[in-house]
């Protein structure tokens, strides 16, 4: 997959927005804005994967405990019972958006409840905040954070090397972190709370991908890239003596300490001319295996070697499965079967064509076999079969010629791990998914093993645009790297991304408001058209014709009746066409690079915005006239939309903290705008079904209101706003797109920059919009209160639960206090969205300020983590004061 970046306009915005001290990251942080009286349930529209997974980490002590890290989409924990991944960093907030990039993960073998994440997305100016180390004592259900005095690069070159973060297996209060940018090696002796540089370490790294890159992206020193402990050189409670460290230096790639990190020396006799991507130690046989490449990856790498170092004798052996002269790739993915340590596997991570390659040895690298071989070129014999029925889009709708196949075994395969408790299970990351097999040992018996996606729950797409038409599919998306999807069912993986053509990234899409079967999308493609059309609501597509000079997608707008289109592509000026883009004409009166949208009623009215000016066309995009409206944001970090059903009703969001910033409304086609005084900052605007009794569609925005960043809803035309997400559900940067659903009251679709399309549904099924100006009637009461207690996750000694408390009476609550007793002596560790006390088995959870008021028929939710021994039965009796609640 290609490198994912936030759009230029966003980066400019982020530079203004995200300065200052980041707030603490914790799952139990109390939101600081008025929350909806009804609760919201948040899920992902299922795509399953979609981006690069550079790291997979299994715990070496506890079976089935595994984690995955992504370059921009957070971290995940494997849930064995459901065969899914649970997201762990949804709580990352707007100001810390870069902390959704995870450069390394470490799972504590001494205490499996502990997990650590080194986070930060870019080391250059694109990310305004420094990196951090997150630490968790409940497997990532909640986190504490230590900010670092330097940046980390989860989405930088070299991000597939590692792991850079490691826990001492003998003394787990000791951790090491390899830093980029010449910052060296760092150590913590208090379980990640504080960190200091290991000044005795002699080499901060020298390798940069491209010294001439003035952006600082490819010209950053990739630094210290992995840390590996030799657990056989220590005893429990005593720091491990021997530690190996990989450095991004082609002449001095591996260092060792034999005195618990006090002194370090270059490992004698090591090969030169390569970077050591991975260092994996087999302590049973006394071998350190190292995967080398001539480049840092994850895309590049033209030569590579695999080496074995005998820790007792210092002997180096070249165990490369093919001759160096025959490699056109580097090695990176590297793993040892802990059940059978002589079994080693590695990947040719940078073999893009015809496919990646996986190598396997059962004699410590003495001999190797391949996942596939040529029979007679171009024909291949595979040791594996591919089953992508759960994610059929992984074929990309392609029909390649041999020796290429679809789906591919993978590309960018830098993460490769054999389950330390199960020799038959292996997982590996690619540029688009996690693949795995559970009959790996078939490889050795000569029969085929089956490779399937093992990625459900891990959503890693960057969202550029969203649309929810009034008929047809409820959701159309424009995504980075995988183009976009048409979701007819949000709970199921679509069969295919948009094809004919397949854009690498779709930058914008639109549908005709009164004929929503007509859809247009634009995007980026190395060679081929940059615009496509559909006449069946996005199910099938055909390519349009580019006007001269187009180099990228830009933004596009469809007339209300689908009769014409206006396109503002990269590389040339704004264009318009009638029909389906067989020929385009230049629009006049509007600058290149303007954002364009259409009026949702008048098919000849289009709008544009560029550098503080709003533009209007009343002749189908042929000519635009600058509006006299003033006071709009001067920059280009702006998104705007016209309201369906009302001509000339336009909402505009955007700006930057050093100038005009907020939400504006026009009812005269942009001739004048009024700024909403109750919205401090806003970055998106979208519309959804009106609340019962409301005369205006529901508004949704990603905004800062009353000092709080969040996702907000208004059912009264922006007079009042309610925050509908909470601090546990923030998803970093959500500024690209938002839309409500025109058919389902309360449903909102939210863009993320790496965590896919998130959608929220309200528990207020009446559509009343309680607490934010909506109408509606109370449901028929059936009692005073009802409680739903759900255990959402459970592991050895710990669990996580959600509690939903519903007001089933006839009157509103102005405060609440819920009591229950644990049947098996469970203990609450952390509780969020409520205050609590516990005495013995008895627990009392009370409202906090923002969720005290609960209307009749509405509900409130809170969650907690806890500990248990023996049995973890659910409480069966709940009381609201003296009133018993129905338990479910």
Image (spheres, grey):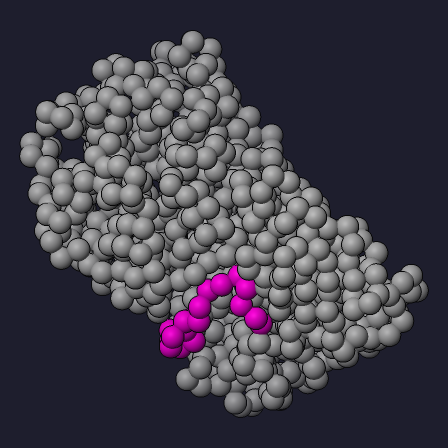
The residue furthest front is 840
Tell me which residue sits at (40%, 57%) in the image.
Answer: 134
Front-most of 65 and 14? 65
Residue 442 located within the stretch drawn in magenta: no
Picture quadrant of residue 652: bottom right
- Against 231, is 874 above or below? below
Residue with the most extreme left position: 268
Question: Within the magenta stretch, is there residue 28?
Answer: yes
- Residue 842, compared with residue 34, is above or below; it is above
Pick the front one: 855 or 445: 855
Give the overall secondary structure of the magenta segment: loop
> Horizontal placement of 415 versus 32: left or right?
left
Residue at coordinates 73% horizontally, 65% vertically from top-left?
Answer: 818
Residue 665 screen position, x and y as percent: 64, 83
* Residue at x 38% of width, y 41% of height: 110
- Please name whichever residue, 508 or 737, is drawn nearer the observer in this view of the structure: 737
Q: What residue sits 14% from the left and 43% below the top?
A: 259
Residue 317: which quarter of the image?
top left
Image location of residue 520, percent across then percent down: 61, 55
Which image quarter holds the N terminus? top left
Residue 789 x/y as whole percent: 72, 52
Q: In which quarter of the image is residue 294?
A: top left
- Magenta span: 14-31
């Amino acid at each position: 997959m290609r490198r994912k970046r936030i759009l230029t306009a966003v980066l400019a915005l982020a530079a203004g927005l995200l300065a200052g001290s980041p707030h603490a990251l914790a799952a139990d942080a109390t939101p600081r804005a008025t929350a909806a009286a009804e609760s919201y349930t948040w899920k992902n529209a299922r795509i399953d994967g979609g981006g690069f997974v550079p790291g997979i980490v299994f715990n070496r002590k506890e079976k089935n405990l595994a984690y995955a890290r992504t370059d921009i989409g957070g971290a995940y924990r494997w849930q064995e019972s459901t065969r899914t991944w649970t997201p762990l960093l949804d709580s990352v907030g707007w100001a810390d958006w870069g902390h959704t990039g995870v450069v390394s993960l470490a799972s504590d073998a001494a205490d499996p409840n502990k997990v650590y994440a080194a986070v930060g997305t870019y080391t250059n100016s694109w990310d305004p905040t420094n990196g951090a180390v997150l630490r968790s004592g409940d497997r990532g259900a909640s986190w504490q954070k230590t900010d670092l005095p330097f940046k980390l690069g989860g989405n930088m070159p070299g991000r597939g090397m590692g792991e850079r973060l490691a826990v001492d297996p003998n003394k787990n209060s000791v951790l090491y972190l390899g830093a980029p940018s010449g910052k060296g090696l760092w150590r913590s002796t208090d379980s990640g709370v504080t960190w200091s540089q290991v000044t005795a370490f002699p080499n901060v790294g020298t390798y940069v991908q491209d010294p001439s890159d003035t952006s600082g992206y490819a010209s950053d020193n990739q630094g210290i890239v992995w840390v590996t402990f030799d657990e056989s050189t220590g005893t429990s409670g005593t720091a491990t003596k021997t530690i190996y460290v990989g450095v991004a230096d082609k002449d001095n790639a591996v260092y060792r300490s034999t005195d618990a990190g006090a002194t370090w020396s270059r490992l004698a006799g090591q090969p030169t001319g390569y970077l050591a991507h991975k260092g994996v130690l087999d302590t049973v046989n006394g071998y350190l295996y190292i995967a080398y490449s001539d480049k840092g990856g994850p895309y590049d790498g033209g030569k590579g070697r695999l080496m074995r170092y005998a820790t007792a004798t210092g002997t180096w052996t070249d165990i490369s499965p093919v001759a160096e002269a025959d490699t056109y790739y580097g090695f990176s993915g590297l793993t040892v079967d802990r059940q059978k340590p002589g079994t080693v596997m590695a990947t040719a991570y940078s073999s893009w064509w015809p496919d990646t390659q996986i190598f396997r040895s059962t004699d410590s690298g003495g001999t190797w076999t391949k996942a596939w071989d040529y029979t007679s070129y171009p024909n291949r014999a595979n040791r594996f079969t591919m089953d992508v029925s759960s994610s059929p889009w992984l074929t990309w709708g392609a029909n390649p010629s041999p020796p290429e196949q679809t789906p591919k075994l993978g590309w960018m395969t830098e993460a490769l791990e054999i389950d330390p408790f199960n020799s038959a299970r292996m997982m590996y990351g690619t540029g688009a998914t996690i693949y795995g097999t559970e009959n790996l040992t078939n490889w050795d018996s000569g029969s085929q093993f089956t490779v399937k996606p093992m990625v459900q729950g891990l959503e890693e797409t960057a969202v550029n645009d969203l649309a929810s038409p009034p008929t047809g599919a409820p959701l159309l998306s424009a995504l980075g790297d995988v183009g976009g999807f048409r979701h007819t069912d949000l709970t199921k993986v679509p069969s295919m991304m948009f094809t004919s053509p397949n854009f690498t990234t779709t930058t914008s899409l639109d549908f005709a408001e009164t004929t929503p079967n007509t859809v247009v999308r634009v995007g980026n493609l190395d060679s081929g058209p940059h615009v496509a059309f559909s006449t069946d609501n996005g199910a099938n597509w055909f390519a349009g014709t580019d006007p001269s000079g187009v180099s990228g997608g830009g933004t596009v707008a469809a007339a209300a009746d689908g009769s014409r289109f206006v396109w503002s592509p990269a590389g040339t000026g704004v264009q318009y066409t009638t029909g389906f883009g067989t020929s385009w004409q230049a629009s006049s009166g509007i600058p290149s690079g303007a954002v364009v949208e259409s009026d949702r009623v008048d098919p000849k009215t289009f709008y544009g915005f560029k550098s503080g000016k709003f533009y209007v066309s009343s002749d189908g995009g042929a000519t635009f006239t600058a509006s006299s409206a003033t006071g709009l944001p001067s920059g280009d970090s702006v998104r705007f939309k016209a309201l369906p059903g009302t001509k000339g009703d336009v909402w505009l969001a955007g700006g930057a903290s050093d100038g005009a910033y907020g939400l504006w409304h026009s009812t005269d086609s942009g001739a004048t705008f009024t700024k909403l005084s109750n919205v401090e900052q806003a970055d998106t605007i979208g519309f959804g079904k009106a609340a019962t009794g409301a005369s205006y569609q529901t508004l949704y925005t990603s905004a800062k209101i009353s000092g709080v960043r969040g996702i907000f809803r208004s059912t009264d035309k922006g007079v009042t706003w309610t925050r509908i997400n909470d601090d546990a559900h923030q998803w970093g940067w959500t500024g690209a797109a938002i839309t409500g659903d025109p058919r389902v009251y309360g449903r909102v679709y939210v863009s993320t920059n790496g965590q896919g399309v998130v959608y929220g549904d309200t528990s207020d099924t009446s559509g009343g919009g309680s607490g934010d100006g909506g109408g509606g009637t109370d449901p028929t009461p059936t009692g005073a209160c009802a409680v739903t207690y759900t255990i959402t996750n459970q592991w050895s000694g710990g669990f996580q639960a959600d509690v939903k408390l519903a007001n089933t009476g006839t009157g509103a609550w102005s405060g609440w206090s819920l009591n229950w007793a644990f049947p098996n002596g469970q203990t609450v560790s952390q509780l969020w969205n409520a205050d609590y006390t516990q005495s013995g088995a008895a627990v009392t959870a009370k409202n906090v300020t923002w969720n005290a008021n609960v209307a009749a028929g509405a509900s409130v939710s809170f969650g907690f983590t806890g500990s248990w021994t023996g049995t973890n039965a659910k409480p069966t009796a709940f009381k609201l004061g003296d009133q018993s609640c129905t338990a479910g």
